[in-house]
Amino acid sequence: MPKLLLSLEVKVNNQLVSVSELARILGVHPNTIRNLADRGAIPSVRTAGNQRRFDPVAVKQIIDSKKTGVAKPGGVWRLSLEGLQEDLVWRTIRSDLQLDLSLAANDIAPYVFLEMLNNAIDHSRGTEVEIVATVTDETWAFSIHDNGIGVFKNIRDHFLLNTDIESIAELSKGKQTTDPSRHTGEGIFFSSKLADNFTLASNGLLWQVNSVVDDQAIGMSDVVTGTQVSFSVATNTEKRAELVFKQFTRDGRFAVTNPRIHLFEIATEFLSRSEAKRLMTGLERFDAVELDFKGVEKVGQAFVDEVFRVWQFDHQNVQISWHNANPAVRFMIERGLPAQ
């Protein structure tokens, strides 16, 4: 027996890879590898320490052979928005796709789908919607495209903003809605946190949020009519909706937000009081604001003073924190913080 274990360890070290390494090679989530191995769909061996190891070449051959000639489940639904009920649509789609409701993705996908379709019904001012779904062993992916006014233009007009990019920034804060009597403005915010990849495209622009690598971006889009929301969730995601909500709620209220600063300007420098005022507009509705300076290269004394002294003094009930600042930004913030 000792000789067998030694032989196995030599093979592990020379040829085989771990769960995480195989997931990286294949471009899938590690839980997908564990699930396939648990089902016996791919071969694995155990080390002396009872860790799984895989032959990446053999596994890739098996997966490629299963893909050949096999159509992935999916579908397209074109529906009138008049009188549409989002819960009935979801039931139809999950039945048509024969979704496995025991998968972890089912803890995330219904919330995002229902919120985004409801936005199309209540806010788009459109007449119809096209829904596209693609389901694989690794991912559930959905796209919802209406023919309405466009979400960025809608937000821009309602809040009297100057540009559609400002609309994206406002949406990223949360609690922004054009119909406060019927909606809280939480749907897009939480959907962007729950999905692994979330993209909101409208009016020639897109806002993309990748929560797997914790990054966001603004870019150009081919979507000029209506709004297209696309999102995907790993079938075996480790996320749990309840835990994501808890990060941003207190006593059941949406009370914490974490705006990414660089979304509020095309440039990466924030120098003026006017930029600070625009950033902080509406954040008085939260108990805590976590400012994320990732991607910001430089801030000015006036910007820092407006946020951390003037605005904070006027809203002492709101707790402000900050993170992901480079050394130059950190220096300016710490230099400008009021003396304790």
Image: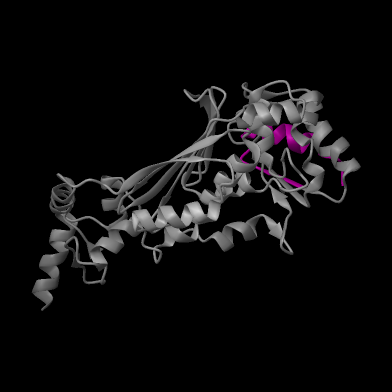
**Residue 103 colored in magenta in the image:** no
User: What residue is drawn where x is 45% and y is 60%?
Assistant: 106
Q: Quadrant of residue 94?
A: bottom left
**Would residue 236 be found to the left or right of residue 284 on screen?**
left
- The picture quadrant where one finds residue 17 is bottom left
In the picture shown, does residue 199 fall above or below 303? Answer: below
Task: Report x, y in % for residue 151.
Answer: 62, 32
In the picture, the quarter occupied by the N terminus is bottom left
Q: Is residue 332 above or below residue 176?
A: above
Instruction: Point out residue 163 in the picture as x, y percentages from the top left corner.
Output: 68, 21
Q: Quadrant of residue 41?
A: bottom left
Looking at the image, residue 286 sits to the left or right of residue 44; the answer is right
Front-lying residue, 339 or 220: 220
The part of the chain drawn in magenta is 320-340
Q: Residue at x 62, y 21 (%)?
A: 267
Is 169 left or right of 160, judged from the image as shown? left
Q: Residue at image x 65%, y 24%?
A: 164
Res. 71 visible in picture: yes
In the image shown, does 231 or 73 lie closer to the viewer? 73
